[in-house]
């Protein structure tokens, strides 16, 4: 058991523009990452997971990712229009979609997910396909507990309140929250107390 904190900010600064597609890590009309930002972040995270999984031998699943290019107006653009009547042009974003291609049916249903993804709207919104990229790069089955508008703790509390996650935890837990949201001592203490209470009730 251990913790690893990945420096996504450093990744973004060094790879802000994709050399292949010219996509940017962030878009002009949204404070979320772009699908490109989600993609390279997932690839970095998957590399870390795979290095551990080589010792665990978890069941593998194959995924395939496809994409289209379409205009997308982010939340900053929609707020400017709603509150100020200002119209800004949408960003052109590559929209990715990841689908499981194998295994299917009863074989997969017998296996518990290898990864729990606990995050914010960055992990939840399908426009960014962060979950799909993680699935494709790790080749592991993932259950997504991410929530929108709940800060960094809403999804974690949702995860901890599921008793199965306490008695039979997944091999990997990914906790995503943006770098403008930090942990203070009181929040860590509250989270610890919640976990201890769950353990006492089992």
Image: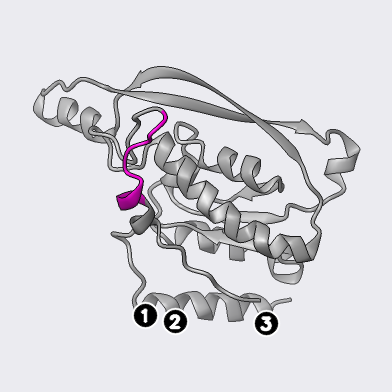
Residue position marked by numbered label 1 in the rendering? 186
Distance from the alpha carbon under mark 1 to that under mark 3: 21 Å
Q: Residues within 10 Å of mark 3 (few under 14, many from 20)?
A: few
The quadrant of the rendering that contains the N terminus is bottom right
Q: Is residue 90 left or right of residue 51?
A: left
Tell me if label 2 and label 1 are in contact, CB under 8 Å. yes
Residue 111: horizontal and vertical position, in percent? 83, 50
Secondary structure of residue under mark 3: helix
Q: Is residue 107 left or right of residue 140?
A: right
Task: Give the label on residue 200, or none.
Answer: 3
Task: Give the label on residue 189, or none.
Answer: 2
Q: How is the image coloured?
A: one colour
Q: Nearer the viewer, mark 1 or mark 3?
A: 1
Region rendered in magenta: 12-20
Residue under the image location 78 percent in, 47 percent down: 60
Q: Residues within 10 Å of mark 1 (few under 14, many from 20)?
A: few
Q: Is residue 157 left or right of residue 188?
A: right
Is 87 located above or below residue 29 in the figure?
above
Residue under the image location 36 percent in, 42 percent down: 33
Tell me if label 3 and label 2 are in contact, CB under 8 Å. no
Is residue 146 part of the magenta span, yes or no?
no
Dot placed on the residue nearer the N-terminal end, 1 or 3 = 1
Is 198 located above or below residue 99 in the figure?
below
Is residue 17 part of the magenta span, yes or no?
yes
When asked about the image quadrant of residue 160, the answer is: bottom right
Between 164 and 22, the residue placed more toward the observer is 22
Residue 197: horizontal and vertical position, in percent? 60, 79
When asked about the image quadrant of residue 87, the answer is: top left
Task: Give the label on residue 57, or none.
Answer: none
Distance from the alpha carbon under mark 3 to that under mark 2: 16 Å
From the image, give the main secondary structure of the stretch colored magenta: loop
């Amino acid at each position: 058991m251990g913790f690893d904190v990945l420096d996504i900010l450093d990744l973004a600064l060094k790879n802000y523009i994709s050399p292949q597609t010219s996509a940017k890590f962030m878009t002009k009309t949204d404070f979320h990452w772009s699908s490109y930002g989600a993609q390279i972040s997932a690839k970095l995270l998957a590399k870390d997971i795979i290095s551990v999984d080589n010792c665990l031998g978890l069941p593998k699943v194959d995924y395939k990712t496809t994409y289209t290019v379409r205009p997308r107006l982010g939340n900053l653009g929609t707020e400017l229009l709603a509150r100020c009547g200002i119209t800004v042009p949408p960003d052109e974003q590559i929209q990715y979609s990841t689908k499981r291609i194998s295994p299917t049916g009863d074989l997969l249903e017998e296996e518990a997910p290898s990864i729990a993804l606990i995050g914010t709207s960055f992990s939840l919104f399908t426009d960014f396909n962060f979950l799909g990229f993680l699935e494709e790069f790790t080749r592991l089955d993932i259950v997504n507990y991410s929530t929108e508008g709940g800060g960094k703790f809403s999804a974690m509390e949702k995860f901890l309140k599921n008793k199965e996650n306490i008695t039979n935890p997944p091999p990997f837990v990914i906790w995503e929250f943006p770098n403008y949201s930090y942990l203070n001592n009181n929040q860590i203490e509250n989270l610890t107390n919640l976990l201890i209470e769950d353990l006492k009730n089992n």
